Amino acid sequence: MTNPLDPAKLQTALETVHRAGMPGLFAEVRDGDETWRGAAGVADVATGRPVTADMRHRVGSITKTFTAAAVLQQVDEGEIGLDTPIGHYLPRLVPGERGAAITVRMLINHTSGLAEYLPHAYPSLAAFPAVAKTTPDSLDDHRFTRFDPTELIAMGVAAPATGTPGGTPGVYSNTNYLLLCQLLELTTGTSAEKCITRNVIERAGLRDTELPDGPYINGPHSLHYEAWFGMIEPPRDYSVFDMSWVGPSASLISTVADLNRFFGLLLAGEIISRSSLAQMQRTVPVISFEGKTLDYGLGLQKTAVPGHGTYWGHEGSVWGGGAISMISADGKRQVSIAVNLQRWNQLGSAQQPHPIDDALRALTQLALGG
């Protein structure tokens, strides 16, 4: 049973996250025809400028749902086969036996076995996921670096495989989605950014959503504070950053209102066909960067919420920015939350949740229905 929106309780829950140590956060919750938006805290710790609920924000891997939708549109049009090997389309990027074994579907649901390229592109993160052996130096070194996506893909393809093609659990990897962007370019004759913008963002009528072509966030936005597990103290602003290191796998800028609109239209069958949506909702276990097991479909995460049924959506993180967007299976209840601090947990404190973790969990639970 989902409870009706309680604006006072939702605002209090937001402020509790802020008091727990989050500089600023904002959210939109929809329940049928009702909509609540709220914000708490600051967009700039130096000036005290407040966050507002309409701010634009880097939403990280929520981008993957947009990219997956663009690929599935091409599946709907017969241009791409979900179970066709990627080597059929991009033999130079994934050559030989692996190219013949890894299908488009395996890229979208992270069961390709292709490794994440980031520890190879960012030298100070080479030891990842052994976080204690990393440093955040590369974040500053590469703030304005323009990466070539095919070079990043080559790093992921050359790295030791994380599993066999199609094997589960899958392992989350941006390499998969950069390959999907190359596939979109091949089949549409235009860049993945233009294809996703035209066929997904504009089609959904999202006025404050874009794939950036430079390091800046246009329009009103918060600074994005990265702590890198306590190694950056005080946390540093990375809101100005060239996002070519992830491209359309995690570079999207959006608002909480636009995210809710997008997921509402997606689950209503307005972005891709019903048959492609059914494929999107076929899930497999996938291990996230944090070591959690996700119930992952084709660019869509499934979450069972005790007492409130099934929710679909995605979460995302970039340097200093994070977001989550979820929609109930019946499309009635929606939640999008954006935060402006990332990796606030200190090293060695994995067993001890930070107060932010508990407060965010409580906010999300309340927003999902009580």
Image: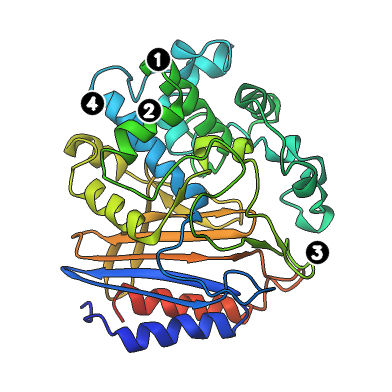
The answer to whether residue 52 is left or right of residue 150 is: left
Q: Nearer the viewer, residue 182 or 127?
A: 182
Taking the spot 76% from the left edge, 53% from the top edge, the residue there is: 130
Measured in 3D between alpha carbons, the distance from the residue under mark 3 to the one under mark 1, in whole angstroms, is 43 Å
Q: Quadrant of residue 29?
A: bottom left
The residue at which mark 1 appears reads as 189
Measured in 3D between alpha carbons, the distance from the residue under mark 1 to the one under mark 4, in whole angstroms, is 17 Å
Q: Which mark is residue 195?
A: 2
Regarding mark 4 in the picture, which secondary structure is present there? Answer: helix
Taking the spot 58% from the left edge, 16% from the top edge, the residue there is: 93
Which mark sits nearer the N-terminus, 2 or 3? 2
Rendered view: 166 above or below 133: above
The answer to whether residue 194 is left or right of residue 293 is: left
The residue at which mark 3 appears reads as 231
Q: Mark 3 or 1, which is nearer the eye?
A: 1
Which mark sits nearer the N-terminus, 2 or 4? 4
Rendered view: 150 above or below 228: above
Measured in 3D between alpha carbons, the distance from the residue under mark 4 to the one under mark 3, in whole angstroms, is 46 Å
Few, some or many residues within 10 Å of mark 1 (<14, 14–19, 20+): few
Measured in 3D between alpha carbons, the distance from the residue under mark 2 to the one under mark 4, in whole angstroms, is 15 Å
Quadrant containing the C terminus in the rendered view: bottom left
Rendered view: 121 above or below 169: above
Q: Nearer the viewer, residue 193 or 282?
A: 193
Which mark sits nearer the N-terminus, 3 or 1? 1
Measured in 3D between alpha carbons, the distance from the residue under mark 2 to the one under mark 1, in whole angstroms, is 9 Å
Q: Quadrant of residue 148?
A: top right
The residue at which mark 4 appears reads as 76
Few, some or many residues within 10 Å of mark 2 (<14, 14–19, 20+): some
Amino acid type at mark 4: Asp
Q: Nearer the viewer, residue 47 or 204?
A: 47
Q: Indicate the position of residue 155 as horizontal and vertical percent values.
A: 69, 27
